[in-house]
Amino acid sequence: MEKLFNNRFIDGISKIADVILISFYFLACALPLVTIGASSTALYYATHKCIYKGRGYTTEFFHSFKDNFKQSTLSWLIFILLYAILGGDIYITRNYLSPDSPFAAASIFFMVLLVFTVLWAIYHFAYIARFENGFKESFKVSAVFMIANIGWTLVMLVLLIAIYYLCYRFLFLILFAPGIISCTLHPILEKVFRKYMSEEDIAKEDEL
């Protein structure tokens, strides 16, 4: 019993160390900002393969970063454009419209769209990390996953708010936030992904 406890304790410490490492990998690779997309894809890939499946090392992060760099970076540029458009809409409706204007409440609508675009990006980069598909198809499929599983999407939103609050209260957690977010959302994303995987693919993954 004591040996089992020690093994679990050591395994737990190892997992925590892995979360810290992939968080630092993400922060270092995302520094140019334009590489946030590729870093997000690599973060989820390393979380899935290394932390949850126990296969390979945290350096698998860089393998995914390299392999998915082009698609993830182009995707990130599109999301940046969407964020800029929605952010501009929010700014204009909040600062340049009269409170009496029938369009004054539009800022709330644009804020909701912005939140769901962030959630869409999470689905999208996780999808790229897990599956091979075309550039346009990846956008379409990840959007469908988000909408078709709106319940889980809202749970993800609540978890993100909770993590944000914890980071606000305990600032040192910001350094580990990427890994914490990825590990927290992973079970939900995998539950969604497995709904659309064939039985053969699921059996193959479980076998590995």
Image (tube, grey):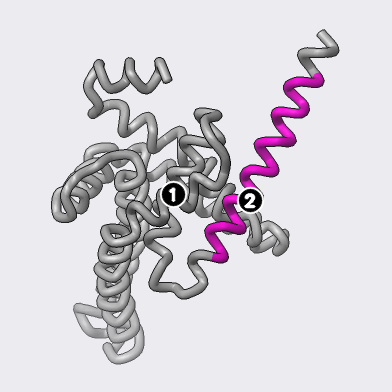
User: Label 1 belongs to which residue?
Assistant: 63
Eyeballing the image, is 115 above or below 95?
above
Q: Residue 175 carries which label?
A: none
Front residue of this view, candidates 133 and 142 = 133
Give SS at disc 1: helix
Which x, y percent locates residue 101?
22, 84
Which range is magenta? Answer: 6-28
Q: Which residue lies furthest to the right in this view?
A: 2
Residue name at image x 71 percent, y 31 percent: 12
Query: Going from the N terminus, do you reach mark 2 or mark 1 first?
Result: 2
Callout 2 amino acid: Leu
Which x, y percent locates residue 133?
19, 44
Q: Quadrant of the C terminus?
A: top left
Badge 1 crowding class, 10 Å Cα cut-off, few under 14, some 14 to 19, many 20 or more, is some
Q: Magenta region's main secondary structure?
A: helix
Magenta run includes residue 27: yes
**Based on the displayed image, in which of its 4 quarters is residue 77 positioned?**
bottom left
Eyeballing the image, is 82 above or below 10?
below
Quick check: can you spot residue 126? yes
Residue name at image x 34 percent, y 52 percent: 67
Callout 1 amino acid: His
Badge 2 crowding class, 10 Å Cα cut-off, few under 14, some 14 to 19, many 20 or more, is some
Quick check: can you spot residue 159? no
Q: Residue 21 carries which label?
A: 2
Magenta run includes residue 120: no
